[in-house]
Amino acid sequence: MKTRFGIWLLLFLPVTLQAQVEASFVVDTNLVKTFSIRCTATDNGNGVLYTWDFGDSQGDTGRVVEHHYMHAGDYRVTLMVKDPVTLASDTSSQMIRILDFLHVPNVFTPNNDNINDLFIVRSSGQEVYTMTVFTRSGVRVFKTTGKTLVWDGKTPAGVYVSPGVYYYVITGEKGFARKGFLHVMR
């Protein structure tokens, strides 16, 4: 009986893992009127780490994130994607603009029928505004300050103004201004 001996030689060669990551994302600005955004990384990398910088000293992690800004302004949103195994990383950024939302109607009917009886200027609620209403000849008939501006169509003496066209000026604490005309109808 013959005995055979064999030697197996196993070579362990270093293997370089080549994982590519790409940082790309979309920003949903449908919520921007409320000072919020939703960001979604558009890659399909599994096991990838996502780190977000919203440009206002705040950050988050995750593939889909929501963020609320405290002030209107221009912000650079940055996404860093990193593969924890290969340590490959990539970064992408986009500029976004957060605007204070201000909706000013152009007509209202203060006639106590509970339909459109108030002139309401809606905002995002982030800034305090002052609204002054004038007659066409420049006489001030109303003034108010707040995050939401409401006028019932009455003068400071409690008397309803006459139907017609009035001029308004809205200023914000940060200098924002809007001017225009409104119609009072009965």
Image: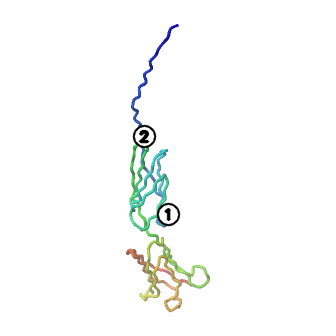
Above or below: residue 131 compared with residue 5: below
Q: Earlier in the sequence, mark 1 or mark 2?
A: 2
> Tag 1: residue type?
Leu
Above or below: residue 14 compared with residue 140: above
> Tag 2: residue type?
Ala
Query: Total marks drawn?
Result: 2
Label 2 residue SS: loop
Q: What residue is drawn where x is 50% and y is 11%?
A: 3
As rendered, which of 180 and 170 lies closer to the eye?
A: 170
As rendered, which of 128 and 85 lies closer to the eye?
A: 85
**Quadrant (top left, top right, bottom left, bottom right) of the C terminus:** bottom right
Categorize mark 1 by other alpha carbons within 10 Å: few (<14), some (14-19), many (20+).
some
Above or below: residue 102 compared with residue 27: below
Badge 1 vs badge 2, beta-carbon distance below 8 Å: no
Q: CA distance from mark 1 to mark 2?
A: 35 Å
Q: Residue furthest top?
A: 1
The dot on residue 19 is 2
Label 1 residue SS: loop
Q: Is residue 117 left or right of residue 132?
A: right
The dot on residue 31 is 1
